[in-house]
Image (cartoon, helix red, strand yellow):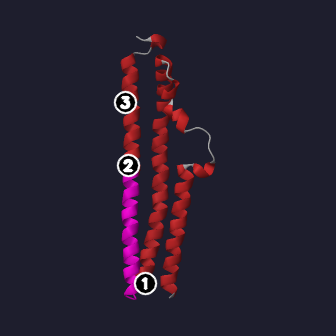
Amino acid sequence: MASGGHDPDDLHGSLNHAWAWYTASMGYRMQAANLYLFAIAGYVAAYIASLQAKLDVVAGFCGLAASVSALVFALLGKRSREYLAAAAAPLAVLQDQLAQRVGVDELRMVERVTSVRPRWRSTAYLGNAFSIFIAGVFLSGSLYAFLR
């Protein structure tokens, strides 16, 4: 057993588990973002094609669907941030133990990236603001199509 009563293999296994959870959660978040961008491209193409074909009702519903998808993406982002936070909590503790054990303070990476910063710089704030903005743009486009 190492100092502090912790087996180095336990620390190694715990770090691997926490990193695997974090990596899987981040991968899910990136896949959701890619799917969202793909869906938005489809909605924009359908909206423009519908307007050009003078199918205003179809264009209006494309705009509504895109607005809803922007809000759903914001909710998925919130959920994936919860998963990332669940992984970050044990990672911070494990990185602290590792930093103490090897004497390298820079190993406290979670602590360094979660330091105090202005709220407007957080990914949660920016992602939600962007999603609400996009939902508003598509809602406006939908109203334009319905009222045209």
Viewer-side label of 1, 3: 3
142 up-or-down from 54: above or below: above
**For marks 1 and 3 on the same chain, the one whose residue lies earlier in the sequence:** 3
Q: Is residue 17 left or right of residue 81?
A: left
**Pointer 1 and pointer 3: residues touching (CB < 8 Å)?**
no
Q: Which residue is under mark 2?
A: 28
**For marks 1 and 2 on the same chain, the one whose residue lies earlier in the sequence:** 2
Q: Give the range drawn in magenta.
A: 30-56
Residue 100 is at least partly visible in this image: yes
Membership of 142 in magenta stretch = no
| Residue displayed at 58% across by 50% down | 121
Q: Which of 56 and 102 is in front in this view?
A: 102
Q: What secondary structure predominates along the stretch shown in magenta?
A: helix
Q: Which residue is under mark 1?
A: 57
* Residue 19, label in figure: none
The answer for how far apart the CA atoms under marks 3 and 2 are is 18 Å
Q: What element carries label 3?
A: helix
In which quadrant of the rendered view does residue 18 lie?
top left
Return the x and y of residue 118 as percentages of the image width and height.
63, 47
Amino acid on which the number 1 mark rests in the picture: Val
* Residue 16, label in figure: 3
